[in-house]
Amino acid sequence: MREKLYRFFMGRNGPDALGQATSFVCVALILINLFVRSYVLYVLELLLMVVWCFRMLSRNLTRRRAENARYLKLRDRVRGAFRRARTRFSERKTHVYKKCPHCRATLRLPRAKGKHTTRCPRCGKEFGVKIR
């Protein structure tokens, strides 16, 4: 019996980051549905469970890996945006962030009141900055 199960799961996709996220969202929807009692949420839960099982048991590894890679790219972009916002908030008393008018790069400058001239490290052009 154990060998049959082992052979069945051989060559399958298995759990990955997208599968973990799908199962987490499904559990969250189940918990929300305990209080809300909505058929729409119930159908959405079932759909997510079917997608999760399909992805785990799929033998089309190249397609599942491409889906997972797209998910990881999107997740990292969102995490990076939150990380940058948290850093900017924690450094708000010591630094100011300004955009280069030529290449639109974000520069981190020390908070020193007055007019200053700075050089963009990306494009190399100088421009004036007024810090209050």
Image: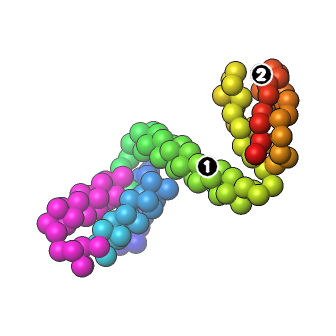
In the rendered structure, does residue 35 fall within the stretch colored magenta? yes
Q: Give the camera-side residue of 85 and 80.
A: 85
Residue under the image location 85 percent in, 46 percent down: 112
108 sits to left or right of 41:
right
Element type at marker 1? helix
User: What's the colour scheme?
Assistant: rainbow
Quadrant of the snapshot with the N terminus:
bottom left
What's the CA distance linking mark 1 and mark 2? 23 Å
Looking at this view, name the residue that lies furthest to the bottom.
Answer: 35
Residue identifier under label 2: 123
CB under 8 Å between discs 1 and 2: no
Residue under the image location 58 percent in, 54 percent down: 82
Asked if 61 appears above or below 79 in the picture, the reply is above
Amino acid type, callout 1: Gly
Image quarter of residue 121: top right
User: Which of the labelled discs sits on residue 116, or is there none?
Assistant: none
Q: Give the camera-side residue of 86 and 47.
A: 86
Amino acid type, callout 2: Cys
In the rendered structure, does residue 15 fall within the stretch colored magenta? no
Residue identifier under label 1: 80
In the rendering, at what x and y percent does residue 28 appear? 35, 70
In the rendering, at what x and y percent does residue 126 appear? 82, 23
72 sits to left or right of 119:
left
Magenta-highlighted residues? 32-55
